């Protein structure tokens, strides 16, 4: 790997560790982003689509029945599940595809794990009339068949990646390889706050709408800032979107990774709990590595959290102690999935259920006058078959 720019954007983390073939492409993306990210006309167009197409702003819902059942802090849910396409991912895909248009690109490629980013990318590509190819690990195409069909229905070509563990890491590898081969007319629309600079900063920018809205809404609800924020963390886009508005405030912040079958074994994706510093997918961050330096195979019942690395800003926030990162097991996530469904009539994505699990653990330790905001990053339609199979197998 040749380094185009190893300048760390987040403490000692970040940079762009990429093959020479990608250096000019990344520079073009960076220059376009810096030119338009604060441009009034660009933001008017972006905000138009967020309001009229995505459906923002979405509610900050007081989950009273869940709060009362737990007997502690009041839990508020930032309802990203109510966005068009059912998750936070659309915030970022609309922003990036508008940049791609400015660059004159005609073709979009992307990676996806759980399929929500793939669906959001295919949706944005259909909206703006662009060719779209989505790379997804073969295992994820099997457990997320509904989202595969949705992507194809929207006009995207879904490429099933059969290498490695056949999950998100391998989809990212395949998408980067395809970008190298088609740089001139292709824009790589990365779905999480990971990868080489400027992608982590760009995704953070477009997802920051989550935190900005939540901050305004909690002040309207309670007159005070929340006592705690909780969000699930795979690569980390929904989390950094919420956290970004509160990092300078006196608010406890917790990110929740996938503990899978337990962090004492190898069947997990608890990067910040068990990982170490290194380079993965063009960035210096914290990742799970084997003793020989190869990237570890990871596992989660959630197709969106089984990523062996984490965004460089999360690595920095972990290193500095500003954010606490914990992990929830498959069982804890499924328990939270069913409890929220039955108490509030909201079926969350399994990814989001990891954050709910942490809120269920934490809320009873706090007094009823305290508040927690949980980012409900997506809805669970895509996961009901997985949950059904899990519950049948654990009876």
Image (tube, rainbow, N blue to C red):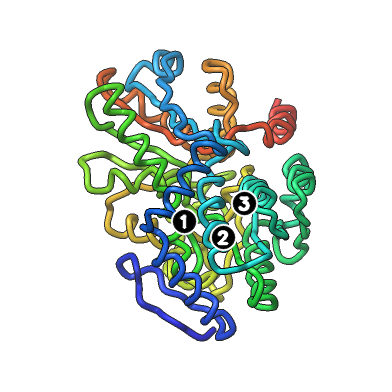
**Which residue carries the number 3 mark?**
299
Taking 285 as reference, is 180 above or below it?
below
Quarter of the image for residue 200 reads bottom left
Contact? badges 1 and 2 (CB < 8 Å) = yes
Q: Please tell me which residue is depicted at 41% across the width and 15% down the height of the picture.
A: 64
Residue topped by disc 2: 190
Relative image position of residue 389 (x, y in whole percent): 74, 32
Residue farthest to the front, as pictured: 41
Q: Can you tell which of label 1 and label 3 is closer to the viewer?
A: 1
Q: Quadrant of residue 174?
A: bottom right
- The residue positioned 56% from the left and 82% from the top of the image is 19
Residue beneath label 1, please?
203
Closer to the eye: label 3 or 2: 2
Question: Contact (CB < 8 A) between labels 3 and 2?
Answer: no
Classify residue 297 by image quadrant. Answer: bottom right
Please state the horizontal and vertical placement of residue 117, each as a whole percent of the image.
Answer: 61, 49
Q: Which element type, helix, strand or loop, lies under badge 2?
A: loop
Q: CA gap, disc 1 to disc 2? A: 8 Å
Q: Which of pointers 1 and 3 lies earlier in the amino acid sequence? A: 1
């Amino acid at each position: 790997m040749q380094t185009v720019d190893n300048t760390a954007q987040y403490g000692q983390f970040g940079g762009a560790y990429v093959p020479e073939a990608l250096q000019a492409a990344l520079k073009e993306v960076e220059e376009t982003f810096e030119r338009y990210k604060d441009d009034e006309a660009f933001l008017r167009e972006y905000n138009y689509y967020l309001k009229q197409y995505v459906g923002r702003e979405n509610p900050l819902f007081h989950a009273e029945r869940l709060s009362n059942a737990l007997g502690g802090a009041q839990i508020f849910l930032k309802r990203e599940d109510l966005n068009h396409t059912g998750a936070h991912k659309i915030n970022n895909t609309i922003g990036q595809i508008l940049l791609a248009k400015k660059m004159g690109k005609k073709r979009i490629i992307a990676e996806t794990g759980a399929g929500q980013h793939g669906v959001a990318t295919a949706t944005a590509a259909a909206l703006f009339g662009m060719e779209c190819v989505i790379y997804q690990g073969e295992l994820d195409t099997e457990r997320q068949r509904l989202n595969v069909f949705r992507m194809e229905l929207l006009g995207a070509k879904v490429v099933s990646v059969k290498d490695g563990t056949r999950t998100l890491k391998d989809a990212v590898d395949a998408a980067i390889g395809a970008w190298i081969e088609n740089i001139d007319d292709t824009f790589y629309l990365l779905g999480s706050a990971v990868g080489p600079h400027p992608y982590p900063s760009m995704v953070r920018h477009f997802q920051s709408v989550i935190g900005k809205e939540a901050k305004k809404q909690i002040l309207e609800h309670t007159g005070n800032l929340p006592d705690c924020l909780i969000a699930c963390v795979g690569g980390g886009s929904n989390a950094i979107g919420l956290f970004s508005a509160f990092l300078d405030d006196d608010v406890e912040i917790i990110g929740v990774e996938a503990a899978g079958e337990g962090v004492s074994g190898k069947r997990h994706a608890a990067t910040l709990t068990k990982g170490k510093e290194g380079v993965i997918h063009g960035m210096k961050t914290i990742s799970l590595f084997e003793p020989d330096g190869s990237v570890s195979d990871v596992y989660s019942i959630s197709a969106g959290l089984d990523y062996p690395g984490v965004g460089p800003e999360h690595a920095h926030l972990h290193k500095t102690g500003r954010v606490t990162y914990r992990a929830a097991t498959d069982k804890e996530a499924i328990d939270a999935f069913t409890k929220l469904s039955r108490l509030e009539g909201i079926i969350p994505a399994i990814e989001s259920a990891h954050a709910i699990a942490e809120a269920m653990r934490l809320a009873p330790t706090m007094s009823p006058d305290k508040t927690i905001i949980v980012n409900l990053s997506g809805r669970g339609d895509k996961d009901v078959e997985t949950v059904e199979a899990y519950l049948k197998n654990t009876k």
